[in-house]
Amino acid sequence: MGPVLLKTIMAIKDLLTSEGRLKFRIQRKTKTLLERYAQHDARMEAADILREIGTPEAIFGLARRFSSTSENLGTDQEEKKRIQDVLVAFGDDAVEPLQRYIRSYDKVTWAIDALKTLQPRDALIPFLFEVLSEGDPVRIRGEKAHQILKALENLDDPNVVDGVMPCLSSSDDTVRIAAIECLEVYGDERAREPLLETLVNPDEDSMRVKMKIGEALEKLEWDVKGYRKRVESALPEQFRVTSKGRITH
């Protein structure tokens, strides 16, 4: 028996059980929900059916709407907001499907915003750092990491600072910049030396990163004590170090 025939037989057997029929229905409605060129009403009808089913897999299917973009961008945003509201209304039942979505997909901003409503910060922040680092801060990269850092930037929790600092070692300069922006918003002086170390690192070859660090240190009015000579060598030419050891331009 060939693999294609075996797969067909197994699919038919699934349809003979209530669990199999439910699984197929969720898959079919999720597919409609994600269809870029489907009519708005068809996508929203599929969303309503998934909401009525309400199982973890159906909720996960709803969250997957955040991973796709419909043809009309205005309608796309409206639909995502509606889906977000539906997910939040599920309460605790939506936490695991949302976490699973965030682990599995790259477009995570809408899902994180929903999860922020459902989880306390002392649970949400460790989860986001776990997803962000994948166990190794050096591997942090990509648009997904950037979205997570922007979400952390808005959480107003000092515990964020220690977790963000390793992101300065990311191989992705966009992620390094997002980390700098996040640390600048928190303004916690624990970040002073890590920022200076990044600036004077001989392997730091991104002018954008150096500019962003210079701007952050200037805004925060942190001095360069212990780093002055190396900072003067590493700073972009628009900046200088004052007699008081602070960066300006």
Image (spheres, rainbow, N blue to C red):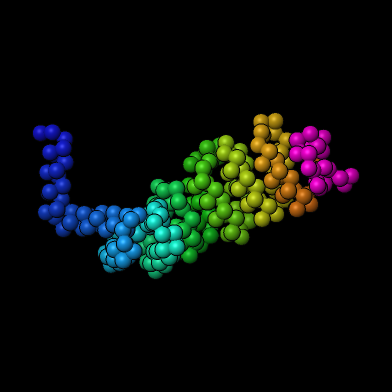
Q: Nearer the viewer, residue 193 or 171?
A: 171
The single residue placed furthest to the top in the displayed view is: 202
Q: Can I make out residue 117 in this image? A: yes
Q: Which of 176 and 238 is in front in this view?
A: 238
Left or right? Give the position of 92 relative to 242: left
The single residue placed furthest to the bottom in the displayed view is: 89
Q: Can I make out residue 47 in this image? A: no
- Give me the residue at 45% from left, 48% from top: 106
> Where in the figure is residue 28, as x and y percent of width and height?
24, 55
Left or right? Give the position of 37 relative to 154: left
> Where in the figure is residue 109, as x and y percent of width and height?
49, 55
Left or right? Give the position of 245 relative to 118: right
- Give me the residue at 16% from left, 47% from top: 11
The single residue placed furthest to the right in the displayed view is: 243
**Above or below 39: residue 1:** above
The region drawn magenta spans: 226-249
> Where in the figure is residue 54, as x and y percent of width and height?
30, 64
- Give me the residue at 22% from left, 58% from top: 25
User: Residue 118 sits in which quadrant?
Assistant: bottom left
- Give me the residue at 81% from left, 47% from top: 248
Q: How many marks?
A: 0
